[in-house]
Amino acid sequence: MPERNVYLDHNATTPLHPEVKRSMNEAMDLYGNPSSMHAAGREARARVEAVREDLAAFLNASADEVIFAGSGSEANNTVLNLFTCNTECPRKGLEGRDEILVASIEHPCVLETSKCLRARGLTVHEIPVDGTGKVDMDALGARISERTMLVSVMTANNEIGTIQDIRPIADLVHRHGAYLHTDAVQAVGKIPVDVRDLDADFLTLSAHKMYGPKGVGALYVKKGVPFCPFIRGGHQERGRRAGTENTLGIIGMGRAVELRRREMDAEAGRLRALRARLRAGIEAHIPDPRFNGHPEDRLPGTMNVSFPGTEGEALLLYLDFEGIMVSTGSACSSGSLDPSHVLLAAGLPAEAAHGSLRISLGRDTSEEDIDYVIEKLTAVVARVRAMSTVYN
Ligand SMILES: Cc1ncc(COP(=O)(O)O)c(C=O)c1O
């Protein structure tokens, strides 16, 4: 048995906030279908619409601009697939355009979907990032054209935490008559996100990254922006996403948003201080660390660090043995031994990318946890390096 359990993988998912759990438990008996006209249905509808209002207010959107979805992945797929629909409105006004631009560090649910779009005849270009993970604005400026329909750039990266300058990107995209989508799954609930300030046309979020339940998210679609459903069937979500709403999940997400409003700012300050403590401990005890991502414009609780002469997977397993849960890349691509596409895109050599850990802090992380991690990580890195033929 490890001395302690320390969960530092909050970018993969977060535990339910106890208040979210309580709200969901209380809502367990709410069985009505929100589309039904009788009392049970009306009760469920009222709860769902209350969350839509709260979530919209949190994003500075209006309620009819929010569509509930089954996940962040689904919302991202919805936006990218919009522009392959030849029969309905989304392509109106975009005649003659056949190109989509995505940042090279996007989440796999954007990158893999864009590969499909390429196979279906669209032109897709990946826009490079600089060494800190920020989108290369010169490359974007050179690539965007009157052929571009959509540009997709994430608000904050899940692996290195770099926060993009979305507003200037939106301005550039709009000057070219195209639409901007931002995947804000890692940003919403961690840093302030205001859709009017960002001027995004589409924005994706997911409840389980902010102490809400898994399997529920939302898509913001700016009023007047063309849209067609990805999932077709019933008329739920005003015809924009078929499928009976996940009432319980939506209620949990609503409570999570309410709590984020109260807790987010204070938590961000606390996490920055804890991350600084972790960094200082690593620098004091472990030779040659390399910290990845933007030095300032970064999610408060995210650290990505490489230890030359190690394999991230070995570090992860030894740390797990000590009760410390971290990640080597995005959770979705763990299981694969390919180096992280994000670190490679930010210019890390494959060898350094292989020896990297993502350590993501959260609302329960304490100073004692950080001190325990420094102690164990120091020993684990030394042990893995001692076995390395490259480092010695
Ligand atoms: C940046 C980003 N986008 C999208 C997703 C997918 O969200 P979901 O797990 O809700 O499908 C994730 C999850 O890891 C993510 O980090």
Image: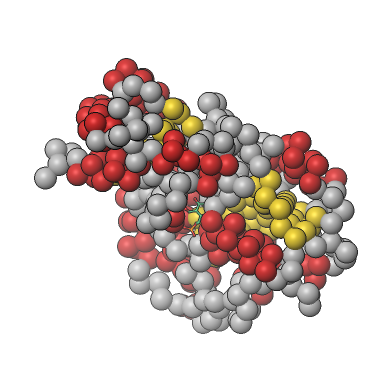
Identify the residue at the far top of this view. Answer: 284
Which residue is found at the position 69% from the left and 37% from the top?
136
Q: How many marks?
A: 0
In this picture, residue 109 sits left or right of residue 274: right
Which residue is found at the position 64% from the left and 61% from the top?
114
Work out which quarter of the rendered image holds the C terminus and state it: top left
**Quarter of the rendering containing residue 296:** top right
Taking depth in this image into account, of 88 and 270 the one nearest to the observer is 88
Question: Residue 115, position in %: x, y?
Answer: 63, 62
In this picture, residue 134 sits left or right of residue 330: right
Identify the residue at the far front of this view. Answer: 389
As drawn, 346 above or below 295: below
As drawn, 208 above or below 300: below
Taking depth in this image into account, of 53 and 289 the one nearest to the observer is 289
Identify the residue at the far left of this view. Answer: 1
Residue 50 in view: no
Question: Residue 17, position in %: x, y?
Answer: 35, 49
Question: Residue 325, position in %: x, y?
Answer: 29, 44
Question: Residue 138, position in %: x, y?
Answer: 76, 36
Residue 109 in view: yes
Q: How is the image coloured?
A: secondary structure
Work out which quarter of the rendered image holds the N terminus and state it: top left
Taking depth in this image into account, of 243 and 26 the one nearest to the observer is 243
As drawn, 113 above or below 234: above
Which residue is found at the position 58% from the left and 50% from the top?
106
In this picture, residue 322 sits left or right of residue 160: left
In this picture, residue 260 sits left or right of residue 4: right
Which residue is found at the position 48% from the left and 40% from the top?
350
Taking depth in this image into account, of 148 and 180 the one nearest to the observer is 148
**Quarter of the rendering containing residue 310:** top left
